[in-house]
Amino acid sequence: MVGEHLKKLFPFKTKWAEPGYVEMLELLEKWFAGKKKILDLGCGRGEAVHYLKQKKFNIKGIEIRKFAAWKELTGKFEVFDGTNIKEKDNTFDAILLNNVLEHVSHKKEFSDEIKRVLKPNGVVVFILPTFIYKLRNLLLLPKFCIGWLRGYGNGKDYWFVHGVEVYRNNYLKEMCDFARWDKIVGTYFNIDEKKVMLNRKEVLFLTHPK
């Protein structure tokens, strides 16, 4: 059964062990092949870090708060302030941003910080929710529920990861942004490859800085 081999890699139940995410993980392996030092920016519970670490990648994850799951996973995890990445210039060969850009309010500053810590020949992989996925969620959840969920984070408006005031109540603008990730990503990065995953929930961009 597809995905069974992945379930053995995680000490808890996670979507990353489900069949729909197998292709995504394997694509990350392909795109990160040969990259010596990788950063997962906005790593969440850390599943991608854990998986790639098992595949012998040198990867660390950073997030704006600590997750209890980190203790159960293999890999290095750190908390950062959501604005400044505590690394020297030209540190990483590759950076992963899994469902992060849609939470970012200051996209230019965010991109500049990524480029600062990325080596000149480095690559950046963006995983972003598709328009179809967002539309489905909006139809299932009342608007007031979505507004309540956006209050997560005690109202802090980080420059980069999880800026909860990115859209405020402008859901039309949010929907438009979700439909034009190519344009938004392409403003700051050259898109080398694009892949819409089989689960139709995410689109992946392999990019390098302009």
Image (cartoon, rainbow, N blue to C red):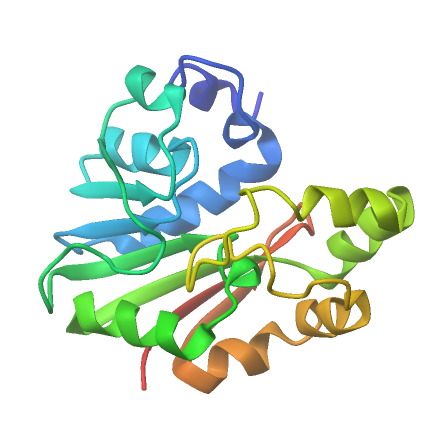
Q: Which residue is drawn at the image coordinates 40% and 13% (left, top)? A: 11
Q: Is residue 162 above or below residue 172?
A: above
Q: Is residue 74 left or right of residue 151?
A: left
Please state the horizontal and vertical placement of residue 156, each as a whole percent of the image.
Answer: 50, 52
Of the pair 167 and 37, the residue shown nearer to us: 167
Q: Name the residue nearer the viewer: 164 or 52.
A: 164
Instruction: Identify the residue at horizontal 68%, vertical 59% (top origin).
Output: 130
Q: Quadrant of residue 192?
A: bottom left
Q: Is residue 195 positioned above or below 173 on the image?
A: above
Q: Position of residue 109 (x, y in %)?
A: 36, 75
Quarter of the image with the N terminus is top right
Q: Quadrant of the C terminus?
A: bottom left
The image quarter containing residue 63 is: top left
> Toward which corner of the image does residue 51 lie, by quadrant?
top left
Q: Which residue is at 49% across, 76% downward?
A: 185
Question: Residue visible at 51% across and 37% down?
Answer: 22
Q: Is residue 84 shown left or right of residue 162?
A: left
- Where in the figure is residue 6, as x and y percent of width and height? 44, 23
